[in-house]
Image (spheres, rainbow, N blue to C red):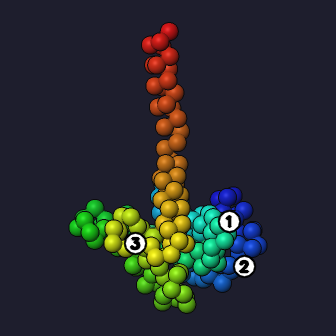
Amino acid sequence: MSKSIDKILKKDKYMDCIRDLIDHEKVQEMNNYIQHGNTTTLDHCIRVSYTSYKISKLFKMDYKSTARAALLHDLYLYDWHKNDEKTSFFKKHGFTHASKALENANKYFKLNRKEKDIIKKHMWPLTLRSVPRYKESFVVSMVDKYKSTGETLVPYTSKIAKACIFFINIFVNLVK
Ligand SMILES: [Fe+2]
Ligand SMILES: [Fe+2]
């Protein structure tokens, strides 16, 4: 577990919202799968959950439902990298995993309507017609995109930095 995740799990008020979920064996099972880059699905869900919780709290929204549903938003429980390229376009992971996550979350936990909406719609706007019904669903959907982009880029940051320095050097030499 990374230091940043460890820090999040020490925040008492946040933990009060998700304490009954975090140690469940199915939630912990997300640790067995890689989400983006080097990040496990569980670490990704904790980051999305905590950031969405903070935003919801700041804007006086339903932060408890936000934290809980965001923690479960990717509870699809399989390695999405396997066989995805062989699958037809609209059956690819990006279009289908939110329904699978909701199916699993419903099986193991009691969810309210807002929590179901947050999980089901988190891939919007990719899933065009699955438009978020609550502002909390919109928050989680946006935070998910933001965190996913960061997690995907982390393994490449040193290469990106080197490429930037390379092009800056070329530019500096040209204008000398
Ligand atoms: Fe997702
Ligand atoms: Fe996600």
| Residue 45, disc | none
Instruction: Give the structural element (helix, strand or loop) at label 2.
Output: helix
Amino acid under disc 1? Leu
Amino acid under disc 3? Val
Residue 14 drawn above or below residue 40: below
In the rendered image, which quarter is residue 62 located in? Answer: bottom right
Q: Does ligand 1 reach within 8 Å of label 3's beta carbon?
A: no
Residue 101 drawn above or below residue 48: below
Judged from this view, the residue extending furthest toward the top is: 176
Q: Does ligand 2 reach within 8 Å of label 1's beta carbon?
A: no
Q: Nearer the viewer, residue 58 or 169?
A: 58
Q: CA distance from mark 3 to mark 1?
A: 23 Å
Q: Residue at (48%, 37%) from the top-left corner?
A: 160
Upstream in sequence: badge 2 or badge 1 = 2
Q: Position of residue 144 (x, y in %)?
A: 50, 63
Q: Residue at (69%, 58%) from the top-left corner?
A: 3
Specify whether residue 22 is in view. no
> On the rendered structure, is 28 left or right of 97?
right
Q: CA distance from mark 3 to mark 2?
A: 29 Å
Q: Position of residue 31 (x, y in %)?
A: 55, 70
Q: Which residue is mark 2?
A: 16
Amino acid under disc 2? Asp
Q: Residue at (39%, 79%) from the top-left corner?
A: 99
Q: Nearer the viewer, residue 91 or 144?
A: 144
Instruction: Give the structural element (helix, strand or loop) at label 3.
Output: loop
Q: Which residue is mark 3?
A: 131
